[in-house]
């Protein structure tokens, strides 16, 4: 149906924008974000792998989500 086709296109565009945003982030921030939201790693696991505190991971995720939201809004995507 047309709605499914539109939804597929919107999902692809959102994926493209998120990929673009992540490529522009510092490597460690990108790694933390992907580990949390793609691989579903725990905060503790990410902190251990990146040799940082859990509070730093939480702060980094919060700031990255805020930047992603701003980026998507600037690109015309309604968040």
Image (cartoon, rainbow, N blue to C red):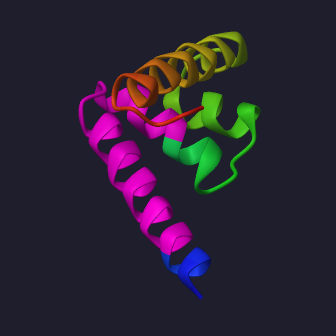
Dividing the image into 4 quarters, which one contains the N terminus? bottom right
Q: Is residue 44 left or right of residue 47?
A: right
Residue 59 lies in quadrant: top right
Percent from the top left, x then y, of residue 60? Answer: 55, 16
In the rendered structure, which segment of residues is drawn in magenta? 6-33
Dividing the image into 4 quarters, which one contains the C terminus? top right
Q: Nearer the viewer, residue 46 or 74?
A: 74
Q: What's the magenta bit mostly, secondary-structure-wise?
A: helix
Residue 9 lies in quadrant: bottom left
Q: Is residue 29 left or right of residue 51?
A: left
Residue 24 on the magenta segment: yes
Residue 59, compared with residue 3, is above or below; it is above
Percent from the top left, x then y, of residue 48? Answer: 63, 32
At a point 27% along the width and 42% down the height, the residue shown is: 20
At a point 24% along the width and 30% down the height, the residue shown is: 24
At a point 58% along the width and 55% down the height, the residue shown is: 38
Residue 61 on the magenta segment: no
Q: Nearer the viewer, residue 73 or 63?
A: 73
Residue at the outermost bottom position: 1
Residue 15 lies in quadrant: bottom left
Residue 70, compared with residue 46, is above or below; it is above
Total marks placed: 0
Q: Nearer the viewer, residue 59 or 68?
A: 68
Residue 57, compared with residue 45, is above or below; it is above
Percent from the top left, x then y, of residue 58? Answer: 68, 18
Residue at the outermost front position: 2
Q: Is residue 19 left or right of residue 59?
A: left
At a point 39% along the width and 32% down the height, the residue shown is: 76
Percent from the top left, x then y, of residue 63? Answer: 54, 13
């Amino acid at each position: 149906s047309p709605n499914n086709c539109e939804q597929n296109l919107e999902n692809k565009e959102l994926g493209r924008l998120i990929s673009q945003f992540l490529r522009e982030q510092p490597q460690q921030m990108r790694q933390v974000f992907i580990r949390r939201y793609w691989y579903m790693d725990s905060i503790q696991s990410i902190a251990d792998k990146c040799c940082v505190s859990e509070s730093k991971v939480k702060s980094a995720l919060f700031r990255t989500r805020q930047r992603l939201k701003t980026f998507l809004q600037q690109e015309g995507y309604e968040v």
